[in-house]
Amino acid sequence: MAHGTPLPADELLDIVDEHDRVVGQARRGEVYARGLRHRCAFVLARNTAGEIFVHRRTEWKLTFPSLYDMFVGGVVGAGESYDEAALREAEEELGVSGLAAPTHLFTFLYRTPEHSWWSAVYEIHCGVPVDPQASEVAWHAFLTQEELDRRLTEWDWVPDGLEAYRRLLAWRRGRTTG
């Protein structure tokens, strides 16, 4: 990590209540250790062929190391909007710049006994070759929808991403039948 760049555990995050209102701030390490509710952005990235960017997280990630994910994204920094975080995270993790703003689809509260965060789900189209961030991405590929759906039962997925993906599929079904 570059000199002067804060470690991920030192990053300052907004703490939010059950209605997604900011009620305080804390360092990421404390947020994770105490299970404090915060904000995350999930971005489904598609290439020009419509294939979905899928990756395996590096083994040193603070949460869900070495698991597969169909979203790029991450925590929303203190004072940062979901939209800003979605674009920042997409460009960082895909290793590209100049992307158009991701499209916000919906937001939901992800909650387990260990974790709780508001999750804004986005979609983005990436028409340039990707060069994923080595500190975040151990492996990657663009998969068709059918290939991704087949892998859902074969690979170990991050639980929050899997929940966001299930909600995304239901959200799309609801939009096409309504």
Image (tube, rainbow, N blue to C red):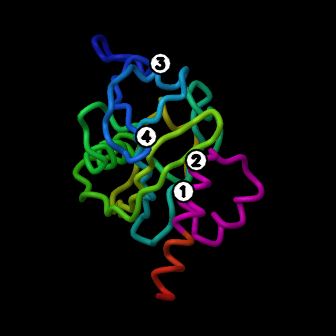
- The reply to whether the magenta stretch includes residue 105 is no
Q: How far apart are the alpha carbons under marks 1 and 2?
A: 6 Å
User: Looking at the magenta stretch, what is its main secondary structure?
Assistant: helix
Q: Nearer the viewer, mark 3 or mark 1?
A: 3
Q: Amino acid at mark 2?
A: Asp
Indicate the position of residue 85 as horizontal and vertical percent values.
Answer: 31, 43
In the picture provided, is 8 more to the left or to the right than 110?
A: left
Which residue position holds label 2? 160
Q: Amino acid at mark 1?
A: Ala
Disc 3 element: helix
Q: Residues within 10 Å of mark 4 (few under 14, many from 20)?
A: some
Would you place residue 136 above or below residue 60 in this image?
A: below
Q: How far apart are the alpha carbons under marks 4 and 1?
A: 13 Å
Q: How far apart are the alpha carbons under marks 3 and 4?
A: 16 Å
> Looking at the image, do the residues carrying marks 3 and 4 touch, with CB atoms under 8 Å apart?
no
Q: How far apart are the alpha carbons under marks 4 and 2?
A: 11 Å
Which residue position holds label 1? 164
> Looking at the image, do the residues carrying marks 4 and 1 touch, with CB atoms under 8 Å apart?
no
Q: Nearer the viewer, mark 4 or mark 1?
A: 1
Which residue position holds label 3? 30
> Looking at the image, do the residues carrying marks 1 and 2 touch, with CB atoms under 8 Å apart?
yes
The structure residue drawn at horizontal position 46% and vertical position 35%, both measured from the top left corner, is: 37
- The reply to whether the magenta stretch includes residue 155 is yes
Q: How far apart are the alpha carbons under marks 2 and 3?
A: 19 Å
* Relative depth, front residue between 116 and 134: 116
Query: What segment carries the magenta color?
Result: 141-168
Disc 1 element: helix
Indicate the position of residue 76 as horizontal and vertical percent values.
Answer: 35, 38
Q: Amino acid at mark 3?
A: Glu
Q: Residues within 10 Å of mark 2 (few under 14, many from 20)?
A: many
Q: Which mark is residue 74?
A: 4
